Amino acid sequence: MGAKASLPYEIGEEYARNSVWKLHRGIVKANNQQVTIFVCNIKENTTDRVDYARNCLKRSKIVKHPSFVAYIECVTGPSFIFFLLIILIIFFAIAVVAKSMT
């Protein structure tokens, strides 16, 4: 994808995927901050899934919790949607809490 060269961050390895998103590790070039990059390839998805991805993007912009997640930025194009989040949730702690509630 030619657009990757002009992005203000580096897209690393893919580590998860679902029906809409591919999750990649990434680094912001300006400050070497580690981020999670959500990638939606518009050409590979149906119209409903692309609408879902755009809705997720819109919702992610309003999520504000400094201890868990921070929205960084979004880049869209005719064939892709990228958005960056810093995800600070410690999954082990969440799993322990969830298990203790059952």
Image (cartoon, grey):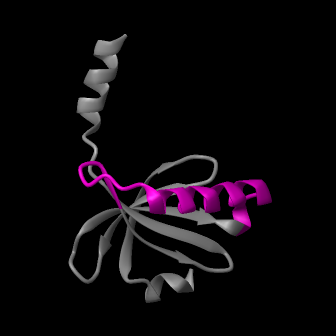
Magenta span contains residue 1? no
Query: Residue, x 33% and y 14% (percent of image)?
Result: 101
Q: Position of residue 6 (x, y in %)?
A: 45, 89
Q: In which quarter of the image is the N terminus?
A: bottom right
In front of the other: 17 or 38: 38
Q: Where is residue 82 in the image (x, y as percent from the top left)?
A: 51, 69
Q: Which residue lies furthest to the top in this view?
A: 102
In front of the other: 61 or 94: 61
Q: Residue 89: which quarter of the image?
A: top left
Q: Which residue lies furthest to the bottom in this view?
A: 6
| Relative to 47, residue 90 above or below | above
In front of the other: 97 or 45: 97
| Relative to 33, residue 99 above or below | above
Report the predominant secondary structure element of the magenta stretch: helix
Q: Residue 7: which quarter of the image?
A: bottom left
Is 8 situated left or right of 23 in this image?
A: left
Is 85 situated left or right of 82 in this image?
A: left
Bounds of the magenta segment:
43-70
Magenta span contains residue 59? yes
Query: Residue, x 38% and y 61% (percent of image)?
Result: 85
Q: Which residue lies furthest to the right in this view?
A: 47
In front of the other: 90 or 18: 90
Q: Quadrant of the C terminus?
A: top left
Count all numbered tags in the image, as a single digit.
Answer: 0
Query: Residue, x 30% and y 71% (percent of image)?
Result: 27
Query: Residue, x 28% and y 81% (percent of image)?
Result: 29
| Relative to 94, residue 66 above or below | below
